[in-house]
Amino acid sequence: MPAITVSRRQALLGTATVAAAAALSGLPPSRTLARAPFAAAQAPYYYRFAHGKMQATVVSDGILPLGDPSGTFLGTSKEEIGKMLTDNFLSTASVVLEQNILVLNTGDRLVLFDTGMGSSQLFGPTPGKMLANLKAAGIDPKDIDAVVATHAHCDHVWGIMSDDGSRNFPNAQIYISQADFDYWTDEAKLAIKEPAFMNAFIAGARKNLLPNRDRLVFVKDGQEFLPGIQAISAPGHTVGHTIYMITSDGKTLAAIGDLTHHQVLLLEKPRIEFAFDTDPKQSANTRVRILDMLAANRIPLIAYHFPWPGVGHVAKQGDGFRYYPTPLQMVLDQKG
């Protein structure tokens, strides 16, 4: 390779060019690259997409760190759990779940599915972001017409009420299965000491649901209780856990709540048990049955706890399933 030589004149011209560029940019010639402070926060935590003639917005209530996965995902060895996470480039030290809250604009109504943790720090300081993210997305809680609960656990109904006793969604009817309402507001269960979370879950459900008894509507299996929104019983995680099939313009989306909490562990091995299930065996049977249906019919889903924003498909893979997240659409399709 021939040697490259630069004359003194060329070098001087190059220096002058750099100085001129700096002058034009408004930067001092001696410092054309400026240091910038590190940002302190992420972008607003919401995402929109079209579903048929409806528009969906996903807002986050923040992450739920569960800690050591072997303490939550049961019925298999710690080594197998660790291998599944490692093979998928996920931490083996702590499982972190998202909280993907769906807001559906049907054209006639604003329907919100689940409400997050409220102000509770039962799982640490990271949840409780729903109201702030609704505001960032331009959604006024007073405009919500319906709150639809998949079940009455803390991270799904504790955002209904504020700490001062006011309603976060003052104009909304609340839809939930009667089985879950009856079970989680049963005062007698406050005396239950095992599992350890039981007392707190009952107290929180009572705090958020009982003040709204006059606006509760109980949904039934198979019922289309709002136009385009059908309840499907999916028990096991709780006695009345319900998923919702949302149909518009011939397109169906399944809001699966806590049918499965993890995009790897409870898909690759769907009969692994989850520590917060009321009936782990029933929950696993329900999970397999409904995931089979979604996979066979290629129905997209939104999963409450999957990586943000939780929208994608499942497909059969061996004895289990695999999750395929839908690519983010950064240009909003107004037609669906």
Image: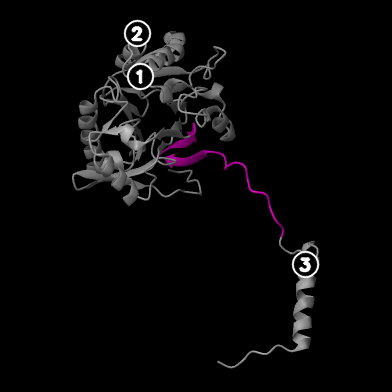
Tell me how far mark 3 sits from mark 2, CA to CA. 72 Å
Residue position marked by numbered label 1 in the rendering:
196
**Which quadrant holds residue 236?**
top left
Q: Viewed as shown, does residue 112 lie left or right of 296? A: right
Q: Viewed as shown, does residue 320 lie left or right of 132? A: left
Measuring from the top left, give residue 45's x and y in whole percent: 53, 38
Residues at discs 2 and 1 in contact (Cβ within 8 Å): no
Label 2's element?
Answer: helix
* Quadrant in the picture for the N terminus: bottom right
Measuring from the top left, give residue 157's x and y in whole percent: 43, 21
Label 1's element?
Answer: loop
Residue sticking out furthest to the bottom: 2
Residue position marked by numbered label 3 in the rendering:
22
Tell me how far mark 2 sits from mark 1, CA to CA. 11 Å
* Other residues around mark 2 within 10 Å, as few (<14) / some (14–19) / many (≥20): few
Measuring from the top left, give residue 197's x and y in whole percent: 37, 20
**Which segment did they paint magenta?**
34-62
Residue position marked by numbered label 2 in the rendering:
191
Tell me how far mark 3 sits from mark 1, CA to CA. 64 Å
